[in-house]
Amino acid sequence: MISKIRKYQDSWLTKAILALTALSFMSLFGISGYVNSANKNRAVIKVDNIEILQDEMNAKLQNNIRKAQNMFGDAIDIDEETRKNILSNIVKEDLINMIIAREAQKENVSISDELIQKIIASQPEFMDASGRFNPELLRRQLSYFDMSEQEYITDLKQNILKSHLVTSPVAKIAFPQFMNPYIAKIENQQKVFNYIVIDPAKLKVDRDMSEEEIEQYYQDFAPQFEEPENRTIEFIEFKTNELAKNITPSDEDIKTYYDSNLGEYIIPEKRKILQMVLDSKETAEKAMTLLNQGTDFYQVANDIANQDKETTRLGEVTPDSLLPELSEDVFDAKLNQVVGPLKSEFGWHILKVINITAKKETPLAKVKADIINTIRQERAYDEALKTMNNVEDKIGSGANLEAIAEEYKLKTFKVTNLKEDGSYVSLSNKKYADLITSSDFIEAAFSYNQGEISQVIETEDGFVLTSVSNINEAHIKELDLVKPEIIKIWTENEKSAIAQEIINDVVADLDNGENLADIANRFNLKLLTTTPLKRNETFANLNSLQLTEAYQTPINEYRLLSSNGTTTIITPIKVINKTISNNKKQLENINANMQQTLEQDLSNELINNYSKDMDVRVKYRLMGLEE
């Protein structure tokens, strides 16, 4: 399982503490809280006793998609392929984190809240002008990075564990400096290759398959031509949003919802504030005197409080977001009025109101329609569950699919000749293509007898009922139907046999010391010659592993490289060794690149070793990913 993890960059781990502490750690300082409301559902990743549930993974995916859209806007299109790529990266990262977390459990390695608190409180980004920790700066950073408290706690602790269990051990193994010139020589070396390509698909067969051979092949391989069972399925869909229209909230329900969500409809007054914080009352009074004399607020903040403009701009605040010691005076002040000095646990504050946004209140009558829709959506699942129970009662009483569809005014759809592999002949509405190929639908389609109605199949939009209207049993296809297929298979086999005969003859001649160019001419094969190539430059569609094998082949010797049925026979004919620069900077860069590659490989190997004694399970299909 762990072999599916891609190689990942460790360089960001070296910045883990500083980068992550640019966020906030609210609970350690008594600010805000976090509620985990994950529902009970199936685990999609499991490492021994550590699990990630389906709802958690879905929430992470939506959070990452939202952040990507916020960052790139219209420049990014979140299509199905992009969604799968994002999800795949989340799965890989979570799997690595879980393996490391489990190893930490086994080795009794833990990170205390006290340590985290000290790290956060010591960061200069969160200190005021007097060098003291300022929770206001934490609030801003938390909001800016759109990250919850618990997400931050988890990420910070995970990365400290990574640093302890992975990064630090591998960082102690350095790539030796004396190897730099040799690596440079290898990277700059070039080779020239002669090669021929033997592709069976391009060869000709000099005879046709006889009728006797066709008949014999049909008899010998009859199971190969079996037509699997297929079924015609009728189905109906109950959509949750349509069922929600049957819900009529009472006036009391609407008023209760409005009162419970006043924060959405009553936007408090906001004020944009400048602030300077000083160590003592005497210094604050000195600053206030300068301000009363007409000195610019920024100038006083810079000269007296040692604050730059960015630090002085407190931004837009509400009465609740300011410290209680400051809030009343600030919100009683007029526009452009200076308030202070005011005392708090952080020092002496002087503030100036530079903009006022009045309170906005949206009356119930104006949002009543929206509230009704919201209540309907909140109760939609209960309505769907109620409908499901009613439908199952009707099925138990003998109702057929047609009768249920008629009662609920639903359209019946049909998929014809559906097979267990998800293929089919026709579908009455193409928008259900994903549904009918899902494992739940296919399981229902092949689990009931003709005329029976399936149990409810839950979907993202509601639920579906199916009924088998026709069954075609598995059977061997008639010879006339499979004859073209038999001839095609035979022809491909013949071409492969001819290709293998040519390969054997070429290899035999090469073993006898003949030149590849002469052999190619005799067999009427095209001899190709590459330009001078470095180790990372490919040819003849060779993959990286085959390219490595090609470069390891000595001059004038040969190697067979096969891929997708095609065989390439190569022989290196020339080596070009370029002069190596002794430029110190270039050699240092080479060493840094090799060090990074070494650390990546060692990190992967270390995580692999950690996981060997763990029960690691990933349900890719449950998440909509390929195995």
Image: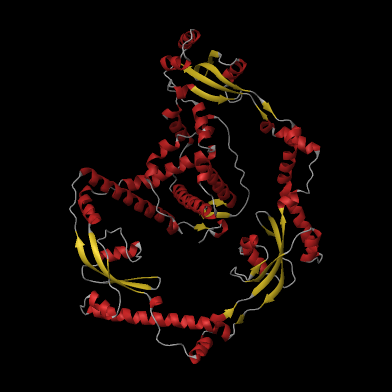
Q: Nearer the viewer, residue 108 or 426?
A: 426
The percent position of residue 151, horizontal first and vertical second, equals: 52, 41
The percent position of residue 37, horizontal first and vertical second, equals: 62, 43
Tell me which corner region of the image, top left, top right, bottom left or bottom right, holds residue 494.
bottom left
Residue 136 in the figure: left or right of residue 605: right
Residue at x-position 28% and y-position 72%: 527
Tell me which corner region of the image, top left, top right, bottom left or bottom right, holds residue 535.
bottom left
Residue 154 vs 224, above or below: the answer is: above
Q: Nearer the viewer, residue 303 or 40?
A: 303
Residue at x-position 29% and y-position 50%: 594
The percent position of residue 577, horizontal first and vertical second, equals: 19, 58
Residue 333 in the figure: left or right of residue 82: right
Q: Nearer the viewer, residue 524 or 361?
A: 524
- Residue 455, visible in the rendered structure: no
Badge count: 0
Q: Residue furthest bottom?
A: 212
The percent position of residue 163, horizontal first and vertical second, equals: 39, 43
- Residue 601, visible in the rendered structure: yes
Q: Nearer the viewer, residue 358 or 393?
A: 358
Coloration of the structure image: secondary structure
Residue 147 vs 280, above or below: the answer is: below
